Amino acid sequence: ALGNHSFRVVAYDTANQSDEVSITVKYWPIFPPVNFVGEKKMNRTIFFVNYYNNLKWEQNSKNTDNANINITNYRIYQMVNGVRTLVTTVSADVFEYNHEKVEKDTEYTYLITSIDAEGNESSGVQVAVK
């Protein structure tokens, strides 16, 4: 179940002397961002053409509506053959990122996750940019 769960464990030795330990476990799952989209764009100057993938997302209201959840960052990974490689980590108040110097005719797949104050990482959502 969701919430904070407290446990108390008492151990007894053969002389019936006891020792006790109490712990509290927090279980508030965090959720990935929503509306993750990407678009390939071109940056043209007099001397060169450069392509980049513009990625945008929105915060997930399941995180913001729960006072027990404190999202601090988002992680963006590039997915290649099911393997994810970290591209960048941005703060929780950033909702757009440009992945620079990508190839014009290559499709890129990205995965984004939310990170909370304890360093827990949500599941991810993906977008493909062609």
Image (spheres, rainbow, N blue to C red):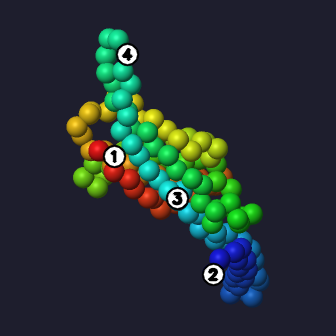
Residue 118 in sight here: yes
Nearest the eye: 1 or 54: 54
Label 3 belongs to which residue?
34
Q: Which is closer to the viewer, label 1 or label 2?
A: 1
Whole-percent x, y for residue 46 in the image: 35, 11
Decide if residue 16 is on the left or right side of residue 50.
right
Q: Pinpoint residue 93: horizontal percent, then vertical percent.
A: 64, 44
Relative vertical location of residue 40 with respect to residue 113 in this rendering, above or below: above
Q: Quadrant of residue 85?
A: top left
Q: CA distance from mark 4 to mark 1?
A: 23 Å
Q: Residue at x 36, y 29 (%)?
A: 42
Work out whether mark 4 precedes mark 1 in sequence or the reverse, and give the earlier one: 4
Instruction: State the quadrant of the N terminus.
Output: bottom right
**How many residues crowd around disc 1 within 10 Å: few (fewer than 14), some, or many (20 or more)?**
some
Query: Which amino acid lies under the numbered mark 2 shown in the image of this protein?
Result: Ala
Q: Residue type at mark 3?
A: Val
* SS at badge 3: strand
Q: Residue at x 73, y 77 (%)?
A: 6
Whether residue 86 appears in this view of the structure is no
Q: Earlier in the sequence, mark 4 or mark 2?
A: 2
Sequence-wise, the earlier of marks 1 and 2 is 2
Q: Find numbered disc 4 in the image and state the secondary structure of the residue it sits on.
A: loop
Q: Measure the C-alpha gap from mark 3 to mark 4.
A: 34 Å
Question: Label 1 near label 4: C-beta < 8 Å?
Answer: no
Q: Residue 70 location, x and y as percent? A: 68, 56
Residue 129 tag number:
1
| CA gap, disc 3 and disc 1 | 16 Å
Q: What residue sits 62% from the left and 46% below the top?
A: 92
